[in-house]
Amino acid sequence: MIAEESWFDDEVTPAFFKSELDDGTGSITVWINSPGGDCFAAAQIYNLLLNYQGKVTVKIDGLAASAASVIAMAGDEILMSPVSMLMIHNPSTVAIGDTQDMQRAIGMLSEVKESIIGAYKQKSGLSHAKLASLMDEETWMNAEKAVELHFADRITSRQDLYPQGENEDPTNGESAVLNGKESKSLTETPMLFSRRKVAAAINKKLCDYAAACEAKTPAQTAEPITHRYKVKDLETRLDLIKHFI
């Protein structure tokens, strides 16, 4: 988790990150596996990496979601594991107060979203409208889709993990660079997941299913009346029943 301050000693804070960043010089590799957290803390870490003098390589080996995806955009090169995911969505907050307080909160969230779009746009080159739409829909991307949309540069291979030949590459170097264009895909199809689109698809399937069931159900027709009784006969039968109750 990314936070302004550490509460449980397992969060990544800007101060902690800066202390590690200042501990050495030269090229660095930032490994990311985070569900996100405080967007302002993430902005500080993003700027620390953006202003770092050496080369910054970002490797997403698990999840780069929400605020963590913003930090990833600061890399000079962004690599994703074949089984990693990247998620972007709108910023959120908790607000309390009157209508003016709510409007101020909405205005603040809108400005935060604009700043996040700036980081995504600088890396991906996608239009403002496209990025805003992807964030509105809470979009999840697998490695191939992230590369396709230019949120990442390429997918990691064994050669990236063992660049000095420490481990034999089973691909014999044939798939050293996996970018979806020059080499064989690691997954069958790129995956782009939108929560809003999934909800709409499920709703459509339910409506289609209900319509299909209604079409298959035969119309209910009244059963023909086959027995007719006179009122007098019915009264006689009721009188008879009364004697046994």
Image (cartoon, rainbow, N blue to C red):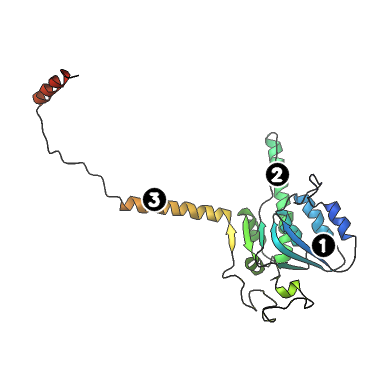
Q: Residue at x 73, y 50 (%)?
A: 37
Q: Is residue 118 visible?
A: no
Dividing the picture into quadrants, the one containing residue 26 is bottom right
Q: Residue 187 at what x, y percent from top left? A: 59, 70
Q: Secondary structure at mark 2?
A: loop
What label does residue 225 carry, if any? none
> Eyeballing the image, is 111 above or below 152?
above
Of marks 1 and 3, which one's residue comes earlier in the chain? Answer: 1
Q: Residue at x 63, y 77 (%)?
A: 181
> Are discs 2 and 1 less than 8 Å apart at CB?
no
Q: Residue 14 at what x, y percent from top left? A: 83, 53
Cα–Cα gap, marks 1 and 3: 53 Å
> Are discs 1 and 3 less than 8 Å apart at CB?
no
What label does residue 50 carry, if any? 1
Mark 2: give few (<14), some (14-19) or many (20+) Cα within 10 Å: few
Dividing the picture into quadrants, the one containing residue 165 is bottom right
Q: Where does label 3 land, which residue? A: 210
Q: Residue at x 87, y 60 (%)?
A: 21
Q: Amino acid at mark 2?
A: Thr
Q: Where does label 2 land, which residue? A: 93
Q: Amino acid at mark 3?
A: Ala
Of marks 2 and 3, which one's residue comes earlier in the chain? Answer: 2
> Eyeballing the image, is 242 above or below 227?
above
Of marks 2 and 1, which one's residue comes earlier in the chain? Answer: 1
Q: Amino acid at mark 1?
A: Leu
Q: Residue 72 at what x, y percent from top left? A: 75, 61
Mark 1: give few (<14), some (14-19) or many (20+) Cα within 10 Å: some
Cα–Cα gap, marks 2 and 1: 26 Å
For the residue pair 91 and 126, the one nearer the viewer reads as 91
Q: Secondary structure at mark 1?
A: helix
Q: Secondary structure at mark 3?
A: helix
